[in-house]
Amino acid sequence: TNNFRANQPIRTTTHVAVARLDHNFSLNDRIYGRFLANESDTFNAPVYPVPGVDPYHSTNDSSFYSLSATWQHSFSPTSTLEARYSWD
């Protein structure tokens, strides 16, 4: 029959990493850095024995990485400079 339905197994694998760095070079100079990573993929197994006839058979990669850094310099108690960089 053409009305065959089944529960298809779905497998999701995820790896997460977080790293942070803080350093004071002096009372006036400080740096901060952060790295985030999330590697994730989802596999939708085929219901039918031939994967080409199953429209829901797929693998999705939804990984992302993020990097940010900040440098702060104090010229005086009332004057500071802050530079930031971010990459996604």
Image (cartoon, helix red, strand yellow):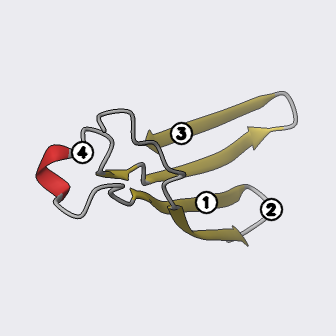
**Residue position marked by numbered label 3 in the rendering:** 84
The residue pinned by badge 2 equals 27
Looking at the image, tell me whether mark 3 or mark 1 is earlier in sequence order. 1
Helix, strand or loop at mark 1: strand
Residue 23: percent from left, percent from top:
70, 71
Per the image, the residue denoted by label 4 is 54
Do tag 3 and tag 4 residues touch (Cβ < 8 Å)?
A: no
Residue 87 x %, y %? 41, 43
Please state which of the two labelled residues, at mark 2 or mark 4, is closer to the viewer.
Answer: 4
Crowd rating for badge 3 (residues with CA inside 10 Å; few <14, some 14–19, many 20+): few
Query: Tag 2: residue type?
Result: Leu
Quarter assignment of residue 14: bottom right
Q: Nearer the viewer, mark 4 or mark 1?
A: 4
Please identify the residue farthest to the right as the structure is shown.
Answer: 77
Q: Of the residues shown, which amino acid type is indicated by label 3? A: Arg
Along the horizontal axis of the image, is 37 left or right of 74? left
Task: Point out the image quarter for the N terminus.
Answer: top left
